[in-house]
Image: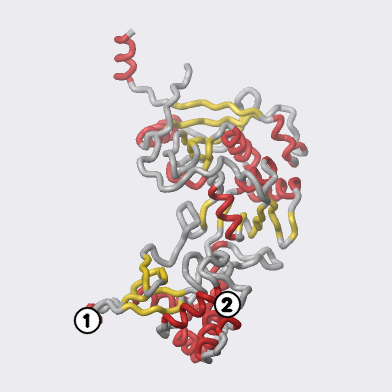
Amino acid sequence: MQAEFRAPRRRPRVSEQYEAPLPASGHFRADLINQHVLVCDPDHIQKIHNQGFFGKGVLSRARPDHSLSDQWEQHEGLFLPIIPESRYEELLKCAGSVLSAQGLDEKGVHQTLLRLSQPVEMEAVRREVGGWGVNGNRGERGRVEPGSEGGASPHEMTDHLTSEVELEHERNCRLDQQDPNPDQDSDSSCGPEGLVPGPGFVLVVSDSAAEGGVRQVRRTPFSLTEYLQLSLEEAFFLVYSLGCLSVYLQQEPLSVIQLWRRLRSLRPDFVSSYAAYHHCRSRGWVPKEGSGAKYGVDLMLYRKGPPFYHASYSVVVERVDGVFRGSALRPFSWRSLAALSRITANVSKELMLCFIIYPGDLSEAELDSPVCLGRLKVQEIIVNRWVSSRERAEQDDI
């Protein structure tokens, strides 16, 4: 029986423009940190995500656009993020905890946080904005370069908060000295965080009703710079198929063979999952792994990208031999398959079983190179739930 094609459902409100299906130009860098592939350069992050929707922000659900606040306000000519005083106090406590963990005594922590929490005059803010530039390089200040041991994982990103606090402390000291030539105070090696002007300012609103919502400009205790996390399949596709990405491990670039073997060691079923990902990408779909976890599948397929269309297919990847035998990556019973099909139908998607067919004579040595992808075959099967009443209606029409 032939599958019935259903047109993808377009999202009713689209707030961005479609740039390109794949990164058209440029060469980018990513770092293999523990078991994660992270893109740290802000320019590379935007180009890789906007052109093909690769990866997701480590602090966001999808697009890497994390900010201290969703509310912004123009205050004496500058746009600043607004946060309540209680939230600002939480940030100060977090910064203090990091400083204490790094060995700074209680008095030093108190003095540093006291300087950071002092209100800043707009004249001083404008001087720093003039020295740093409102449209400076995005996110340079909070960037963390991977260390000699491979760097920190996304869960260890708070390790660099101490340097952020110290930077803010040093800037406060420079302002306190009232240097007559403030342009020389700016450190060109540090850039502004995201959309925050200068080294990082926020508009703190008092929580007390008696104070009438007093607004004060203060410095951010630290910045959390968002990185782009690529799935293993996305990273290898950009390296192997497009040739626009280099993945580094401990500051050394990995060759295609080295990266393939490394990713296989991180995930035993990487060959099958990448073959399915490559197949779907080559047919014009945008496969996303993270979305599939919500529906119990391996991939979700989008037309053009998640901002423009809802996912059309929920994909389950299976490995079989030439006669469709072999140990299943995801063993199904009839009950679990029916449940998955019902869930998929309830969210207006179709369930697709993507079988990666391995030749019987394919050896383990051949799997140690991406050349083996040329010997694999892909078979797609759409699973539909049989509805007896619909079947009777169709027979009556005939």
Q: Quadrant of the C terminus?
A: top left
Vertical relation: 357 (above or below) 230: above
- Residue 243, percent from left and from top: 70, 45
247 horizontally vs 187: left or right? right
The residue that label 1 is drawn on is: 210
Crowd band around label 2 with a 10 angstrom C-alpha radius: few (<14), some (14–19), many (20+): some
Of 31 and 7, nearer the camera is: 7
76 horizontally vs 281: left or right? left
Which residue corresponds to the image point at 61% horizontal and 27% vertical from the top-left? Answer: 325
Which residue corresponds to the image point at 51% horizontal and 87% vertical from the top-left? Answer: 175
Occupied quadrant, residue 343: top left
- Residue 57, percent from left and from top: 51, 56
Vertical relation: 279 (above or below) 188: above
Callout 1 amino acid: Ala
Cα gap from disc 2 to disc 1, whole angstroms: 37 Å
Crowd band around label 1 with a 10 angstrom C-alpha radius: few (<14), some (14–19), many (20+): few
278 horizontally vs 195: left or right? right
Coloring scheme used? secondary structure
Residue 163 has which mark?
A: 2
Q: Is residue 335 visible?
A: no
C-beta proximity under 8 Å, tags 2 and 1: no
Kindly state the secondary structure of the residue where label 2 is placed: helix
- Residue 116, percent from left and from top: 46, 83
